[in-house]
Amino acid sequence: MVGNAPEIVNLQQAQQSTIASAAARWLRLRSLQLPWGRRWSFLCVSARCIYCGGPGDLGAIDLCEACLATLPWLPPGGGGEARAVFAYQPPIDDDLRALKFNGDLRPARVLGALCAARLAQDGVVPRCIVPVPLHPQRLRERGFNQASRLARELAAWLGVPVEERWLIRRRSTAAQTSLPAAERRRNVHGAFTLSTLGLTEPELSGASRACIVLLDDVLTTGATLQAAGAAFGAAVSLQRWTVAMAMPAKMAKPT
């Protein structure tokens, strides 16, 4: 296996390069098709890459192709049942922490666009995006839902709506990061339900004929996305997506 390590690394680099190149092409083309209001802001103020500070060259996004190619893209199928776009490594981990804990929306705009490019590469054509909700108490404490911010940017690039009323978190749970992997599923089991105000029977019937993307920010064990998806049952065609996949803590520690 040691002798094959360079070949594995080269294959991973080739996959990441292919994904990045396809994403760059999609972003440039899609930028020309975005609503005028979104394009206008970049005509007034030129795009600047949030990573290197240089000129953006990918259309209506603050990113350059050189930095795009260095991001830790995951190959197709990364994450198992839930598909992850990136590995939870720099600069993606820093971006998500800046969004979640500092309310910095710049990473959300970039990451939402990159998630859209990845879904398009995978041939995903969703009817709508449903962000994993926070409990109302947690939402009041934080002031915003990071998954919702990401979902809005993703949806804007795909030209589909965001449905934030369909899924609700009916009970507050302990933060997943504070729990060992074995307890995370128990922590969120039954925590989500469909909203009687948002998702009506006609909408549910229509949703069953189209794909719905359930979006979260970080995947570790997949427990939260699995619990949230279970609330929909078998009535819809559901895909679970997350911006980044983190390595479980027990795997990160040397044995």
Image: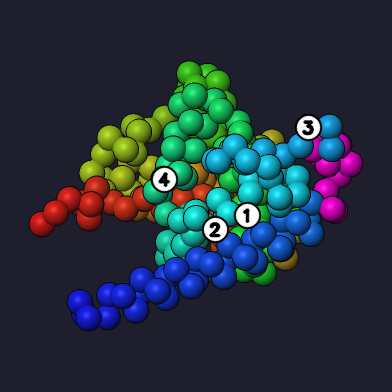
Does residue 209 appear to the left or right of 5 in the view shown? right
Are the residues tagged 1 and 2 within 8 Å (C-beta)?
yes
Q: How many marks?
A: 4
The residue mark sitting in front, 4 or 1, is 1
View extreme (left): residue: 255
Q: Residue at x 34, y 75 (%)?
A: 8
Amino acid type assigned to the residue bearing label 4 in the image: Pro
Are the residues tagged 3 and 4 within 8 Å (C-beta)?
no
Disc 2: which residue: 69
| Residue 127 position in % (x across, y down) | 73, 56
Q: Residue at x 89, y 41 (%)?
A: 36
Q: Quadrant of residue 122?
A: bottom right
User: What are the residue bounds of the magenta stretch?
Assistant: 32-42
Q: How is the image coloured?
A: rainbow
Give the mark nearer the N terminus: 4 vs 1: 1
Amino acid type assigned to the residue bearing label 3 in the image: Val
Give the mark nearer the N terminus: 2 vs 3: 3
Disc 4: which residue: 90
Q: Quadrant of the N terminus?
A: bottom left
Q: Was residue 132 drawn as part of the magenta stretch in this picture?
A: no
Q: Quadrant of residue 179?
A: top left
Disc 1: which residue: 65
Does residue 44 appear to the left or right of 2 in the view shown? right
Disc 3: which residue: 45
User: Which element carries disc 1, helix, strand or loop?
Assistant: helix
| Residue 162 position in % (x across, y down) | 70, 43
Does residue 171 appear to the left or right of 40 in the view shown? left
Give the mark nearer the N terminus: 2 vs 4: 2
The residue mark sitting in front, 3 or 4, is 3
Calculate the distance from the C-alpha at mark 1 to the C-alpha at mark 3: 19 Å
222 and 235: which is toward the camera: 222
Give the mark nearer the N terminus: 3 vs 4: 3
